[in-house]
Image (cartoon, helix red, strand yellow):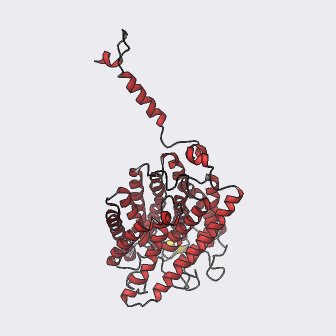
């Protein structure tokens, strides 16, 4: 290996990439438990398909557009690495191979469109969803990743490298990006049948808790791994991630108890995810006390924000807007208050003598990504809806999207029913005048 290579850093980043990959199945379980029985498989596979589609596109041109040398004023990378051309096994990005860096960033690209799927649960054609994922990562995610994550000594992405917007691990590029796309799509597809009328409760809270636990576990790779080295910054990002997540769960539960009179398992899981989202952009620039504050604020505000869909009349099925768009915006903006200048960034927030300069930069980053993602996502959704159709028919939605789109069901209730029927019949009394003993009587 060439000079500058670090086996420790490489191992750390590869493990982090594997952790981030695990977040997509974790998200599938988190979302899958929140929907009704008749659409749980569809929800699971909407996340899983991103692993296939985005991986192939990343190799073909995604990495090059995201992290190739800037081609036009910090807006997009060049096409020098199409098909991963020109990237050798021993080429380095810092102290790690470019292949390790590419693998790590690929997992970010995979989970981002998967996050969107929760906004349109129960009502999207699977083929249309796959097409949307392919188009969206190409036109939205890859350029935004270049804006935010590509650094080249002031000649990289226009938000992060050229204008100083801080996003350590994806508050804008991942969460605001996905959240606003989710808002656009749920407006295009419209409300579910029975929205605000029929109960649409989670069918399996244990699955929700399992999914949130896997997300929490994988998020250490998401955030700490973004240091791209096994160093003190990674350790700080790891601690801030844990602290903010715990604090957000408490903040969400406190709001829920005051507002609704109960502490729910769904609230605990959702609060944890809100904290993970909010600390993502900030974990490399705030202190551990700052992480506590960010978590508490995000937990309470996101808990309040999920009611917006009822007030404003849009059907965000699994609260992608309230958790990811709002949580990502909170975390990004609070950097402008809590950045210490002594963690992984030199910029200081308002509470540390930095004035409002950094807050203005953060607000610009939030606004630009939110508007771009919403507009392009809405246009893509409308184009698909008017051509091949994006939404399933009302009959399919009512009957259950799993059977129609996938010819499967998550649970085999027919077997359960047959077993119950046999059990009941074995205990039934014999008809009057019968001389045949039941199995229960013989056993007795």
Q: Residue furthest left?
A: 444
Q: Position of residue 5 (x, y in %)?
A: 48, 74
- Residue 113 lies, in percent from the top left, at 56, 63
Does residue 8 appear in this view?
A: no
The answer to whether residue 366 of the structure is visible from this angle is: yes
* Observer-nearest of 106 and 10: 106
Name the residue located 42 percent from the left edge and 79 percent from the top edge: 334
Quarter residue 69 falls in = bottom right
Name the image quarter holding residue 73: bottom right
**Is residue 16 positioned above or below 414 on the image?**
below
Residue drawn at (64%, 63%) of the image: 381
| 395 relative to 114, above or below | above
Frontmost residue, 260 versus 142: 260
Q: Is residue 232 above or below residue 313?
A: below
The number of callouts visible is 0
User: What residue lies at 44% left-to-right and 89% top-to-bottom?
Assistant: 356
Q: Position of residue 163 (x, y in %)?
A: 54, 85
In the displayed structure image, the side of residue 135 where residue 246 appears, left or right: left
**What percent of the width, then of the height, locates residue 96?**
49, 72
């Amino acid at each position: 290996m060439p000079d500058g290579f670090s086996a420790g850093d490489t191992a750390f980043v590869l493990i982090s990439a594997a952790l981030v990959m695990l977040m997509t199945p974790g998200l599938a379980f988190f979302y899958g438990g929140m929907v009704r029985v008749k659409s749980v498989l569809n929800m699971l596979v909407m996340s899983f398909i991103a692993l296939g589609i985005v991986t192939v596109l990343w190799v073909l041109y995604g990495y090059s557009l995201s992290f190739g040398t800037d081609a036009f004023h910090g807006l997009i990378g060049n096409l020098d690495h199409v098909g991963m051309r020109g990237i050798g096994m021993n080429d380095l990005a810092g102290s790690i191979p470019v292949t390790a860096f590419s693998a790590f960033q690929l997992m970010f690209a995979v989970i981002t469109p998967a996050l969107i799927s929760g906004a349109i649960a129960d009502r999207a054609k699977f083929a249309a969803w796959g097409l949307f994922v392919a188009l969206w990562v190409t036109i939205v995610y890859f350029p935004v990743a270049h804006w935010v994550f590509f650094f080249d000594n002031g000649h990289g992405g226009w938000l992060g490298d050229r204008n100083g917007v801080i996003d350590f691990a994806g508050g804008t590029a991942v969460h605001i990006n996905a959240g606003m796309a989710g808002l656009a799509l749920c407006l295009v597809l419209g409300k579910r049948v029975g929205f605000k009328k029929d109960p649409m409760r989670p069918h399996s809270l244990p699955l929700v808790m399992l999914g949130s636990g896997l997300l929490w576990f994988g998020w250490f790779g998401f955030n700490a791994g973004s240091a791209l080295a096994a160093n003190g910054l990674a350790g700080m990002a790891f601690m801030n991630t844990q602290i903010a997540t715990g604090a957000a769960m408490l903040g969400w539960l406190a709001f829920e108890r005051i507002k609704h009179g109960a502490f729910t398992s769904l609230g605990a899981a959702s609060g944890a995810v809100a904290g993970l989202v909010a600390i993502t952009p900030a974990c490399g620039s705030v202190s551990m006390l700052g992480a506590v504050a960010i978590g508490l604020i995000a937990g309470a505000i996101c808990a309040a924000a999920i009611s917006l869909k009822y007030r404003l009349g849009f059907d965000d099925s699994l609260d992608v807007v309230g958790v990811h768009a709002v949580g990502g915006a909170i975390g990004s903006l609070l950097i402008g208050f809590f950045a210490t200048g002594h963690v992984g960034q030199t910029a200081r927030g308002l509470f540390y003598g930095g004035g409002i300069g950094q807050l203005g930069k953060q607000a610009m980053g939030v606004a630009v990504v939110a508007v771009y993602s919403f507009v392009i996502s809405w246009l893509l959704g409308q184009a698909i809806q008017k051509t091949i159709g994006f939404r399933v028919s009302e009959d399919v939605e009512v009957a259950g999207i799993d059977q129609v789109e996938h010819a499967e069901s998550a649970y085999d209730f027919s077997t359960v029913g047959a077993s119950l029927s046999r059990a009941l019949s074995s205990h039934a009394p014999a008809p009057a005048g019968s001389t045949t003993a039941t199995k229960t009587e013989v056993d007795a």
